[in-house]
Amino acid sequence: MRGAQTLTPASLPAPVWVVAPHPDDEALGCGGLIAALGAAGREVRALLLSDGGLSHPSSPSHPRERLAGARLAEWQAGLAELGVPAARTRTLGLPDGELHACAEAITRGALAAFREAPPGTLLLPWARDPHPDHRAAWAPLLRAARAFPGVRLLAYTVWLEERGDPADHPRPGETRPLTLDVRPWLAPKRRAIRAHRTQLGLIADDPRGFSLPTSLVGRALNGTETYHEVAPQEVPA
Ligand SMILES: [Zn+2]
């Protein structure tokens, strides 16, 4: 990305909290960085907002409760591949697809989780990442982040390159773009993504079921991760 600076994982203040609206966002958006942070001895913690229970609404084999349980197990398995043990994960269990109606619960839940280990750095989905749940998480998470002065805020993207409009991309000067060469971490990142088997065709009995686009997975494994740093004081209240 033009004008982007190089991100040095070891320079990020710890603990680094990564917030995922759905299980798999952390692996797709920041799997390389999470693995690199672990290798650099930085503590990484993860917070999952939704139950992920909406990806296969008509599956006889995976009614919502079973699907949500499977996705939680996949999330923790994927994070373990990246060096984050289950003991450093927290979940809010909010309804997948309805985060727009959960602003207060996101702020309250994130605050409670963050207070256990005050974040030095927060990785969160970009404000205009084109998925309604991702967008809905932005403002409530920033409200929670305000309780931790000096926290570094790095936005990651999942759907932006796949289906974003030009207006969804950060405008020049709106963020500080940072790129990370994640080629040394592609093996664990690939394993972390592959842990999300329900999102990769495992459930065959739902014609309306979701599957991660091959193009999106390919982009996530292209060897570079881009982050958009925002300064807390520049974020509108
Ligand atoms: Zn997502």
Image (cartoon, rainbow, N blue to C red):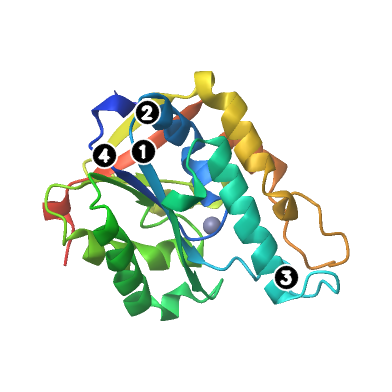
Q: Amino acid at mark 4?
A: Ala
What residue is at 36 percent from the left and 57 percent from the top? 127
Distance, label 1 to label 3, CA atoms, is 34 Å
The residue pinned by badge 4 equals 14
Regarding mark 1 in the picture, which secondary structure is present there?
Answer: strand
Among numbered discs 2 and 3, the one appearing first in the sequence: 3
Is label 2 or label 3 in front?
Answer: 3
Q: Nearer the viewer, residue 74 or 131?
A: 74
What residue is at 26 percent from the left and 39 percent from the top? 14
The residue pinned by badge 3 equals 66
Among numbered discs 1 and 2, the one appearing first in the sequence: 2
Q: Residues within 10 Å of mark 4 (few under 14, many from 20)?
A: many
Image-quarter location of ligand 1: bottom right
Among numbered discs 3 and 4, the one appearing first in the sequence: 4
Distance, label 3 to label 4, CA atoms, is 34 Å
Q: Position of residue 63 (x, y in %)?
A: 76, 75
Left or right for 153, reference 76: left
